[in-house]
Amino acid sequence: MRFEKPVPVTTIATLIGAELVGNKNGNATGINEIHKVEQGDIVFVDHPKYYDKCINSAASFIIINKKTDCRWQGIAYSG
């Protein structure tokens, strides 16, 4: 799903009560499922089975339910 206009990731992190790590100046252009995600998108993952697939996807930002050692470009931890 494309957003009408880019949304600052800080806004999204605040809305969901997440800790933002990495690129805090980024803007998300959409949100999508892991198998449809594109550059600029946010993807959400809440199961360890899909962590690697998410991290290695085309997504620019990840919302994840658990802190990881990952030093990825834009990640929000929401537990």
Image (cartoon, rainbow, N blue to C red):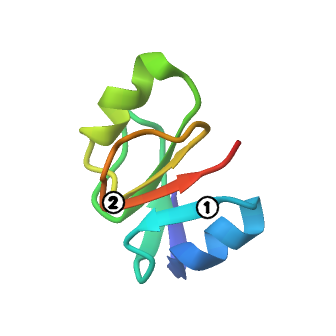
Above-or-below relation of 36 to 18: above
Q: Which of the numbered marks, if any, corresponds to residue 60?
A: 2
Residue contact at pointers 1 and 2, CB within 8 angstroms: no
Screen quadrant of the C terminus = top right
Q: Is residue 49 left or right of residue 10?
A: left
Q: Earlier in the sequence, mark 1 or mark 2?
A: 1
> Which residue is nearer to you in this view: 67 or 7?
67
Badge 1 marks a residue whose secondary structure is strand
User: Can you identify the residue that label 1 sits on?
Assistant: 19
Q: What residue type is disc 1 on?
A: Glu
Point 54% across, 56% down: residue: 76
> Which residue is nearer to you in this view: 1 or 66?
66
Point 25% across, 49% down: residue: 58
Above-or-below relation of 41 to 46: below
Point 59% across, 30% down: residue: 46
Badge 2 marks a residue whose secondary structure is loop
Point out residue 43 in the picture as x, y percentages from the top left corner.
Answer: 47, 47
Q: What residue type is disc 2 on?
A: Ser
Q: CA distance from mark 1 to mark 2?
A: 16 Å
Which quadrant of the figure has residue 27? bottom left
Point 75% across, 61% down: residue: 17
